């Protein structure tokens, strides 16, 4: 299992494996922040992510695909800014898009850790 803690700072703080984290995003109140855990690297281009959020729901084993960001955003693990053109992971869409379809994780944050 791969996990990261977010302090809202520029760089992610590391946590023990399996720990859940909350990321302080300025426009979302603390109680409404998603809890995101990267469970595993399913393939070289996909992650299995656990997502729990009071606004968008719970996805115990959601597949996230590596891609190039088409728009700016904020990493749900680190809180760092994402620019269009950055390498990111985002929820895979098959059929109807999930409510968290706009969420992104900076690829280098996950790629830096060895896979469990």
Image (cartoon, rainbow, N blue to C red):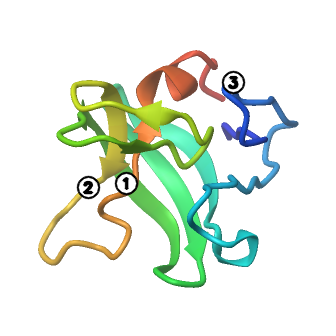
> Label 3, on which residue?
11
Label placed on residue 92? 2
Q: Position of residue 100 (x, y in %)?
A: 38, 68
Q: Is residue 83 above or below residue 75?
A: above
Q: Residues within 10 Å of mark 2 (few under 14, many from 20)?
A: some
* Real-space Cα separation, disc 1 to disc 2, in angstroms: 6 Å
Q: Residue at x 61, y 66 (%)?
A: 34
Answer yes or no: do the residues labelled 1 and 2 have beta carbons within 8 Å? Answer: yes
Q: Which residue is mark 1?
A: 63
Q: Quadrant of the C terminus?
A: top right
Left or right: 41, with 44 as reference point: right
Judge by depth and name the residue closer to the eye, 1 or 56.
56
Q: State the residue lying farthest toward the left.
A: 95
Q: Are marks 2 and 3 in contact (CB under 8 Å)?
A: no
Q: Earlier in the sequence, mark 1 or mark 2?
A: 1
Which residue sits furthest right?
Answer: 16
Front residue (pair 87, 83): 83
Q: Earlier in the sequence, mark 2 or mark 3?
A: 3
* Horizontal relation, residue 3 to residue 25: left or right: right
Choose the circle earlier in sequence order: 1 or 3. Answer: 3
Query: Nearest the camera: 93 or 5?
Result: 5
Circle 2 SS class: loop
What percent of the width, then of the height, locates residue 95? 12, 74
Write down the quadrant of residue 7 in the picture: top right
Measure the C-alpha gap from mark 2 to mark 3: 26 Å
Residue at (55%, 65%) from the top-left corner? 51
Residue ID at (56%, 64%): 27
Could you tell me which secondary element the residue under label 1 belongs to? strand
Q: Quadrant of residue 53?
A: bottom right
Q: Is residue 52 placed above or below 105 in the rendered structure?
A: below
Residue 105 position in % (x across, y down): 46, 40
């Amino acid at each position: 299992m791969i996990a990261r803690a977010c302090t809202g700072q520029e760089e992610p703080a590391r946590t023990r494996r399996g720990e859940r984290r909350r990321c302080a995003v300025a426009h979302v109140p603390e109680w409404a922040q998603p809890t995101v855990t990267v469970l595993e690297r399913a393939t070289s281009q996909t992650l299995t992510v656990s997502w729990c959020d009071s606004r968008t729901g719970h996805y115990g084993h959601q597949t996230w695909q590596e891609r190039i960001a088409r728009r700016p955003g904020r990493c749900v693990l680190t809180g760092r800014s994402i620019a269009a053109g950055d390498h990111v992971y985002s929820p895979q869409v098959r059929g109807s898009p999930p409510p968290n379809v706009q969420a992104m994780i900076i690829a280098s944050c996950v790629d830096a850790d060895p896979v469990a």
